[in-house]
Amino acid sequence: MTGPQLISSLQNPRVKAAIRLRQRREREATGLLLIEGYHELALALECGARLRELFFCDTLCAPGERPLLARIEGSGVRCCQVTTAVMGKLAYREHPDAWLATAELPHRRLEELQLSPTPLLVVAESVEKPGNLGAILRSADAAGVDAVIVCDRATDVFNPNVVRASKGAVFQVPVVEAGSAETLAWLRQRGIRVVAATPSARRSHWEAELGGGVAIAVGTEKQGLSPLWLQGADEQALIPMHGRVNSLNVAQALTLLVYEALRQRR
């Protein structure tokens, strides 16, 4: 391979700068995020992500992946070839592949969302675990929801573990971070009903009205939704569980709710 600079030192300043992007404070200060993995990077590019720098490990490159390198090089992005040891240092997954890039943080506001005539939205309030937030984004992508609104964030949307858990869906699904009060007011202004998921509801998600313009709200893993959402919702819904253990995490519950919404819309 010719062209890209070869980095073999773990102490290289570019390597250190990329590693620092694992921290929220550094992402916010620089306006950059990390994208690791061939499929995640390819999807991010298809969705318009603006790359700043690519780290590429030739020895880890799988058959058929190399055209992506030519595409990125051709776009003028700075590309660096790294050794296996350096990629192991850069990567945050246990078994890295050949690809890791830095990219500009997307910025989107509620007012910029483009909604369908009868939108299906997801509101995730203070979801704490990056894996759960990533899984919510994957389900939202699979169900074709209009947008995911992350309220009063407990983990930021572009945490590397969210990007990884979402399989890149964070770049495909329109995502906005906003406050709960702001979001609730925005939904009311647009006549979008709010259905709050809570175990204390009297009606199941099969009985809830999930057709038309609706936002399905889910809350923290331990406490659920805050009183603001529970009191401000047009309807509350529960997912019946017959075991002795509260077996569904927030991402699993959200998946059942959005697919029930799809069923009703059919």
Image (tube, rainbow, N blue to C red):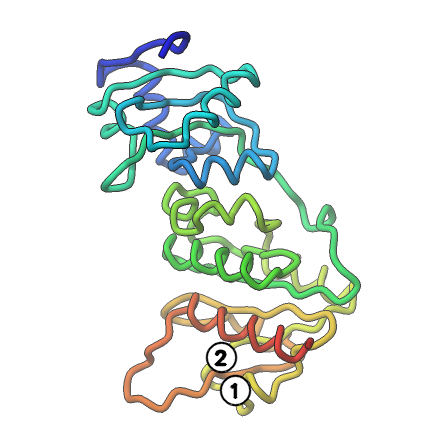
- Residue 155 vs residue 92, the one in the foreground: 92
- Write down the residue under mark 1: 201
Q: Is residue 11 above or below residue 226?
A: above
Residue 89 horizontal/vertical position (percent) = 24, 28
Q: Quadrant of the N terminus?
A: top left
Residue 119 horizontal/vertical position (percent) = 71, 64
Q: State the SS at label 2.
A: loop
Tell me the tag on residue 230: none
Circle 2 residues within 10 Å: few <14, some 14–19, many ≥20? many
Does residue 223 appear left or right of residue 225 in this picture?
Answer: left
Q: Is residue 136 above or below residue 168?
A: below
Residue shown at 70%/73% (left/top)?
193
Residue 207 horizontal/vertical position (percent) = 60, 89
Q: Is residue 186 above or below residue 45?
A: below
Spatial distance from mark 2 to mark 1, Cα to Cα?
A: 6 Å
Q: Amino acid at mark 1?
A: Ala
Farthest residue to the front: give it: 63
Residue 74 horizontal/vertical position (percent) = 55, 16
Q: Amino acid at mark 2?
A: Thr
Circle 1 residues within 10 Å: few <14, some 14–19, many ≥20? some
